[in-house]
Image (cartoon, rainbow, N blue to C red):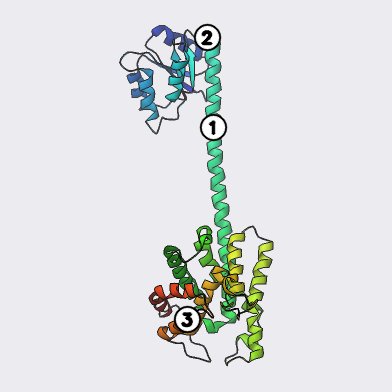
């Protein structure tokens, strides 16, 4: 049995009797002669509907409703005011206090039944909608987590693939992420970037940094894994990795709805070897033609290459690497971002000297 429960509050015994006789064939009805008795019962039981008289001694219906709306566990119980005041101001006052409707006394039993039926239906539909929205949000959250896990799995796999093919750069991807995080956060805080930074998803940029060298997958092993210094012709082949990386990410973009993350990754992969004076690759972009993220990544990538050991060279100490970055200001690097680098150089040193390599 799923009968709804209705509480009726009125100091007039006649009204209570009429309500009880009208409603009891359909609902579980409990009657109360005062607001204080109602509030005491509400501590133990929550009804589906309350019919509340306004003009009562001790405590008016308005006062009772204020108590109801102020209590979290019962604030959503629909309340219909019962009143003999037939004027617009009284009706507006009742609705302003949070009542869902107004029924004038003496009331018609069929009208009373219809009003209650209507508001119980509205409440039921509202609760169903809330439940549906909560369930829908749970489904969205679960789907989002699945997509993020898949994205991270693919990202990790591609990153490991690059690492496996170019094991001379051990820890490079991890460190470049950490350098990038330092530069981005300090640059935003210090106002080094244009207004476009306001729309950046910094966490996504840091994550996408892992793909900046993904184009190395396309470089032949005999060149990529060569223990000696590369010939000019071999270096020309290696230089193609920037364009390869951009193309690979662009292909992934075509079949994905996640464009922001991949857009960041494509910028980083395709522009981190461009130079401020236009002598970089793959396009020879110059100055502000180079995207901001590409200019930042250039400093990050070069710094880590300088401090890292390779089969054909020893890693430079931090101070030497920093001086090379400074010398490249205005030629290799955006001077403004070299200034930014200098504000966090000590933190770069800590990262480079950590055991992540």
> Callout 2: 10 Å neighbours few (<14), some, many (20+)?
few
Mark in the foreground, 1 or 3: 3
Image spot of residue 49 (x, y percent): 47, 23
Q: CA distance from mark 1 to mark 2?
A: 27 Å
Earlier residue among tags 1 and 2: 2
Residue at the disc numbered 1: 126
Find numbered disc 1 in the image and state the secondary structure of the residue it sits on: helix
Q: Which mark is residue 349?
A: none
Front residue of 255 and 269: 269
Image spot of residue 190 (x, y percent): 42, 65
In the image, residue 151 above or below residue 67? below
Q: Quadrant of residue 294?
A: bottom right
Find numbered disc 3 in the image and state the secondary structure of the residue it sits on: helix
Q: Residue at x 57, y 73 (%)?
A: 287
Q: Which mark is residue 325?
A: 3
Image spot of residue 67 (x, y percent): 36, 26
Asked whether the viewer can see residue 344, the reply is no
Q: Quadrant of residue 117?
A: top right
Q: Is residue 351 left or right of residue 110?
A: left
Residue at the disc numbered 2: 108
Front residue of 346 and 178: 346
Q: CA distance from mark 3 to mark 2?
A: 88 Å
> Callout 3: 10 Å neighbours few (<14), some, many (20+)?
many
Q: Residue at x 55, y 67 (%)?
A: 208
CB contact under 8 Å: marks 3 and 2: no
In the image, residue 50 above or below residue 321? above
Earlier residue among tags 3 and 2: 2
Asked whether the viewer can see residue 138, the reply is yes
Q: CA distance from mark 1 to mark 3?
A: 62 Å
């Amino acid at each position: 049995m799923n009968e709804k429960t209705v509480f009726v509050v009125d100091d007039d015994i006649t009204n209570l009797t009429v309500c009880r006789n009208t409603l009891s064939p359909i609902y579980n009805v409990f009657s109360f002669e005062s607001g204080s008795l109602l509030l005491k019962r509400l501590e133990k039981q929550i009804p589906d509907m309350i019919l509340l008289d306004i003009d009562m001694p001790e405590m008016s219906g308005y006062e009772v409703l204020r108590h109801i709306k102020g209590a979290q566990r019962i604030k959503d119980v629909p309340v219909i005011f019962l009143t003999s005041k037939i004027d617009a101001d009284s009706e507006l006052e009742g609705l302003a206090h949070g009542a869902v409707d107004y029924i004038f006394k003496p009331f018609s039993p069929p009208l009373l039944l219809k009003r209650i039926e209507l508001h119980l239906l509205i409440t039921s539909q509202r609760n169903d909608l809330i439940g549906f929205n909560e369930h829908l949000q749970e489904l969205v959250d679960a789907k989002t987590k699945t997509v993020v896990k898949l994205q991270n799995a693919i990202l990790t796999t591609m990153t490991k693939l690059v690492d496996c093919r170019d094991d001379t750069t051990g820890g490079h991807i991890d460190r470049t992420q950490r350098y990038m995080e330092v530069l981005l956060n300090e640059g935003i805080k210090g106002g080094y970037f244009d207004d476009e930074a306001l729309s950046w998803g910094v966490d996504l940029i840091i994550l996408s940094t892992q793909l900046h060298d993904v184009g190395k997958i396309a470089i032949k092993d005999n060149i990529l894994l060569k223990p000696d210094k590369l010939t000019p012709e071999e270096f020309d082949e290696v230089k193609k990795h920037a364009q390869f990386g951009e193309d690979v990410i662009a292909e992934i973009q075509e079949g994905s709805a996640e464009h922001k993350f991949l857009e960041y990754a494509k910028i980083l992969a395709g522009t981190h070897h461009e130079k401020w004076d236009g002598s970089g690759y793959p396009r020879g972009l110059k100055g502000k033609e180079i995207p901001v993220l590409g200019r930042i990544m250039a400093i990050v990538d070069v710094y880590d290459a300088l401090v890292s050991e390779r089969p054909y060279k020893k890693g430079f100490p931090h101070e030497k690497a920093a001086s090379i970055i400074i010398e490249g200001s205005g030629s290799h690097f955006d001077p403004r971002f070299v200034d930014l680098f200098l504000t966090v150089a000590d933190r770069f040193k800590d990262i480079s000297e950590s055991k992540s390599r």
